[in-house]
Image (spheres, grey):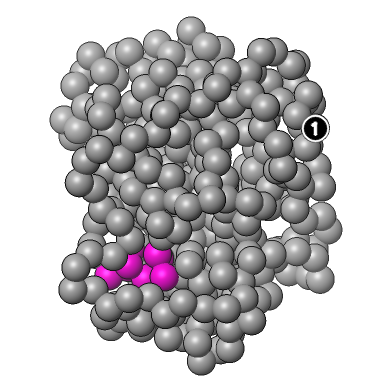
Amino acid sequence: MTAATTMAKPAAGTTGGGRRYALLLALWDSEYASKVYGGYYNVFVAAFGGAGGDGERWDCFRVIAGEFPAPEDLASYDGFVVSGSPHDAYGEEPWIADLCALIQTLHAMGKRVLGICFGHQVLCRALGGRIGKARNGWDVGVKKVTFVRDLEGFGFLGDLEELPSSASLIEVHQDEVWELPPGATVLAFSEKTRVEAFAVGEQALGIQGHPEYTADILHNLIDRLTSQSAIPASVGEDARRTVSETGGPDRAFWMALCKGFLNGGRRSCSRPTLVREPAPEVSSRAIVAGCFTAGTAPMVQLACRASTCQLARAFSLH
């Protein structure tokens, strides 16, 4: 374990004998999210909660502060959600390295991990893919995401005939997946982003956009990004227009998709079926970050039945 990492006591939601999930928050609560929603924890649970039925429990860990679930508790969780973040998923901060190690451990254990935005990118990085700055720059607003045709073998997607050809999704990112992890499949893409969603079997699902965000959260983010000069005012205005032009995100569909994944594919969402398109080629023609750089100690590879001692070692990268 690095010096910055602590094994936090979870901040829990509902208690009971139902399914248990861990939310790994890679960001601090904005003033707006705190005031309107009581923090991002509530935003995520409102969007993805309910997949596990009565007695479902959500524990919150602020990984950006070095708070992680204890290794001996990992087996008790049915699924994990990694949030977005203002940080780069290819960064070398200790907590990001520890998050990569945790994701690798969870994948070895066969646990379900859902990555959102930064979480989508760090999931790719941890499982052996490559990520970097988006070639087309910032993508902000409500955008059309197109699903790949002829997808097979993913139980959490339900009946393929029930997938839409496309669905609108809130996007706020300037980084992207450049090269998929071994064994990964592109599920969806968009005009600016070649990997909007990918999966590795039934255990890992990455979504570049924000299924949990509402239109008001997007508007607040646009205001903050423009006031901080992170994006030009013109980009902000274009992003605001996408909300009215698209009618807003297809949030119900995306939430149902995420819930179905977290719940083991027991629920599916019925949507109109249109013609799906093939995925674009995903290139790796650039020097971008993998999970570990030169000089970093290799991750201890774990078997699915890793002991508590091995799990603890998995967090020790330096």
State the extent of the magenta-drawn residues as a range: 94-101
Residue appearing at x 39%, y 34% in the figure: 282
Residue 118 can be seen in this image: no
* Residue nearest the viewer, comparing 133 with 232: 133
Q: Of helix, strand and loop, which one carries label 1?
A: loop
Q: Where is residue 161 drawn, in percent x and y? A: 78, 24
Q: How many marks?
A: 1
Q: Quadrant of the C terminus?
A: bottom left
Residue appearing at x 25%, y 29% in the figure: 135
Residue located beneath label 1 in the image: 159
* Residue nearest the viewer, comparing 224 with 193: 193
Q: Against 102, is 284 above or below?
A: above
Residue appearing at x 55%, y 41% in the figure: 185
* Residue nearest the viewer, comparing 153 with 118: 153
Q: Quadrant of the N terminus?
A: bottom left
Q: Against 143, is 205 above or below?
A: below
Mark 1: give few (<14), some (14-19) or many (20+) Cα within 10 Å: few
Is residue 99 one of those drawn in magenta?
Answer: yes
Q: Against 301, is 194 above or below?
A: above
Relative horizontal placement of residue 146, taking residue 51 as reference (left or right) = left
Q: Against 136, is 287 above or below?
A: below
Q: Where is residue 74 drawn, in percent x and y? A: 60, 75
Q: Where is residue 12 drawn, in percent x and y? A: 61, 68
Q: Amino acid at mark 1?
A: Asp
Q: Where is residue 98 drawn, in percent x and y? A: 37, 71
Is residue 45 one of those drawn in magenta?
Answer: no
Residue appearing at x 54%, y 59% in the figure: 23
* Magenta stretch: helix, strand or loop mostly: helix
In which image quadrant can residue 236 be found? top left
| Residue that extends furthest to the bottom in the rendered view of this protein | 309
